[in-house]
């Protein structure tokens, strides 16, 4: 009797287990959400980690260093690499790991053929305002790989007065930007302009007669036109974002006037036919989460009009607005959908997250690095790690703890006495260090490629 009862119990348990296993498989395979399976799914715990691990591996297939036979080595991830100074990491160990693989391949092609454009979008806050840092990085990259021209200029700019690389003098424009309530799908600069405005635009980086392509970047239109140096030019594109060539000559200045009040205008661009084009997209006071106001289709239209090969996002100091804050989990929550949107809209583009620089507050009567900065750096690095993006530690590259205080105290100073912003000299130093980090990563790519041949 007891044996029969035990047999029935074992049979019942076995059948239940089998049924639960089948349901678990169906739940996992078809992504069926049901609370019992959310808590305990017999296969999810086994396969989900493997699935995520394989996905991460697939996303980073092109970064694995090939051995002499050209096959990929097994690379080990190390999150702690984010602490390394003057170094671009994708969190894989190895002296020859290439973090910006797609970008490095484009650099290699440009270096070999001297043909084609490589376009870089460098996003940031007031740390890069007025083309600080980016003007030097642009100059160094163009010297190494070719190209000239200042790239993107907004239709109107409040900081045009102190920008050394370009001049924008404009009036009569209606403006919307990131900070306007309800505003949506302004350009990636954070601004959109409309109305019957006018402006004069000058590229100050050109020192010799060189053929420059001048583009107008604008949105949807219905047969509109602009006056370009006194000549009426019809606007041909009707996409969400359009880049129309206005002229190709050695003039470094032109005048522009809108003849259509309802067309969104975004900016102009001075470009060489081949080489490096680096666009500065600075917007004072932001943290990057503002890009939630730009939808994915609009970002895809940006990429279609002007293909970007590298996107750099340098944010952080504006998250350090309270001296005693140490928890930045809210930033992870708010920035994650932004990064996911960029990854989806720019699938063939490398994305580099640049950390916060140093920022100091007064503690016990003296200026010291913000208490929350180590936690913020880890938060930013974790965002890069979890989304398989590259990372550059600007804080450590500056010199680490209290470096902003030291920079502001030097003679001549490298930073302002607000203990937030490096000055022009300091920004040049940071640009040079980032350039050398990019070149080191590029040389790793070259070594990998030459070894595989």
Image (cartoon, rainbow, N blue to C red):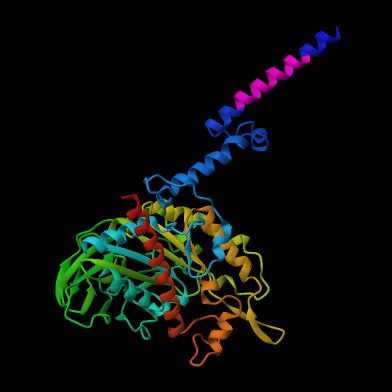
Magenta stretch: residue 21 in it? yes
Q: Outermost residue toward the bottom?
A: 411
In the rendered image, the quadrant that contains the N terminus is top right
Is 306 in front, or is 10? Answer: 10
Residue at x 66%, y 70% (from the top left corner): 325
Give residue 116's position: percent from left, percent from top: 23, 61
Magenta highlight range: 9-23
| Residue 362 quadrant | bottom right
Q: Is residue 323 left or right of residue 224?
A: right
| Residue 384 seen in this snapshot | yes
Q: Residue at x 45, y 67 (%)?
A: 178
Closer-to-camera residue (420/276): 276
Count the labels in the image.
Answer: 0
* Most frequent secondary structure within the magenta stretch: helix
Pinpoint residue 404: horizontal percent, then vertical percent.
56, 81
> x and y percent of residue 106 in the render?
30, 58
Q: Quadrant of residue 23?
A: top right
Whether residue 193 appears in this view of the structure is no
Of all residues, the one furthest to the right in this rendering is 2
Based on the displayed image, in which of its 4 quarters is residue 328 positioned? bottom right
Q: Is residue 69 magenta?
A: no
Instruction: Identify whether 69 is placed above or below 352.
Output: above
Q: Is residue 188 left or right of residue 146?
A: right
Q: Residue furthest front?
A: 68
Near-viewer residue (51 or 28): 51
Q: Position of residue 244 (x, y in %)?
A: 22, 64
| Residue lying at 39% horizontally and 60% vertically, measured from the top left | 444
The residue sitting at 43% across, 68% down in the picture is 437
């Amino acid at each position: 009797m007891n044996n029969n009862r035990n047999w029935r119990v074992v049979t019942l348990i076995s059948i239940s287990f089998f049924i639960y296993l089948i349901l678990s498989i169906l739940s996992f395979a078809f992504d069926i959400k049901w609370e019992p399976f959310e808590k305990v799914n017999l296969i999810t715990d086994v396969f989900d980690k493997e699935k995520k691990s394989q996905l991460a591996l697939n996303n980073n297939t092109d970064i694995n260093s090939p051995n002499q036979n050209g096959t990929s080595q097994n690379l080990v991830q190390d999150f702690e690499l984010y602490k390394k100074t003057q170094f671009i990491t994708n969190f894989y160990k190895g002296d020859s790991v290439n973090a910006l693989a797609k970008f490095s391949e484009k650099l290699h092609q440009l270096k070999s053929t001297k043909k084609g454009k490589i376009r870089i979008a460098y996003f940031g806050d007031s740390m890069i305002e007025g083309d600080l840092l980016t003007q030097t990085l642009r100059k160094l990259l163009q010297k190494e790989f070719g190209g000239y021209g200042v790239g993107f200029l907004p239709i109107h700019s409040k900081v045009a007065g102190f920008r050394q690389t370009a001049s924008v003098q404009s009036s009569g424009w209606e403006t919307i930007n990131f900070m306007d309530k309800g505003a949506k799908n302004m350009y990636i600069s954070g601004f959109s302009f409309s109305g019957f405005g006018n402006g004069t635009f000058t590229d100050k980086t050109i020192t010799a007669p060189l053929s420059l392509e001048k583009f107008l970047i604008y949105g949807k239109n219905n047969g509109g036109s602009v006056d370009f140096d006194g000549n009426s030019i019809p606007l041909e594109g009707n996409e969400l974002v359009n880049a129309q060539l206005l002229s190709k000559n050695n003039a470094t200045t032109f005048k522009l006037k809108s003849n259509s009040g309802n067309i969104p205008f975004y900016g102009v661009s001075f470009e060489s036919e081949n080489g490096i084009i680096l666009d500065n997209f600075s917007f004072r006071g932001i943290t990057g989460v503002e890009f939630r106001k730009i939808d994915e289709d609009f970002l895809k239209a940006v990429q279609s009009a002007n293909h970007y090969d590298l996107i750099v996002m340098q944010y952080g100091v504006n998250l350090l607005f309270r001296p005693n804050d140490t928890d930045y989990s809210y930033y992870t929550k708010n920035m994650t959908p932004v990064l996911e949107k960029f990854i989806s809209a720019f699938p063939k583009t490398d994305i580099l997250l640049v950390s916060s620089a140093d920022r100091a507050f007064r503690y016990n009567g003296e200026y010291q690095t913000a208490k929350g900065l180590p936690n913020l750096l880890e938060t930013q690095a974790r965002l890069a790690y979890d989304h398989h993006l590259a990372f550059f530690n600007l804080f450590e590259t500056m010199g680490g703890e209290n470096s902003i205080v030291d920079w502001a105290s030097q003679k001549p100073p490298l930073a302002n006495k607000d203990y937030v912003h490096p000055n022009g000299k300091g920004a040049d130093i940071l640009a040079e260090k980032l350039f050398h980090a990019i070149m080191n990563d590029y040389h790793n790519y070259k070594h990998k490629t030459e070894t595989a041949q």
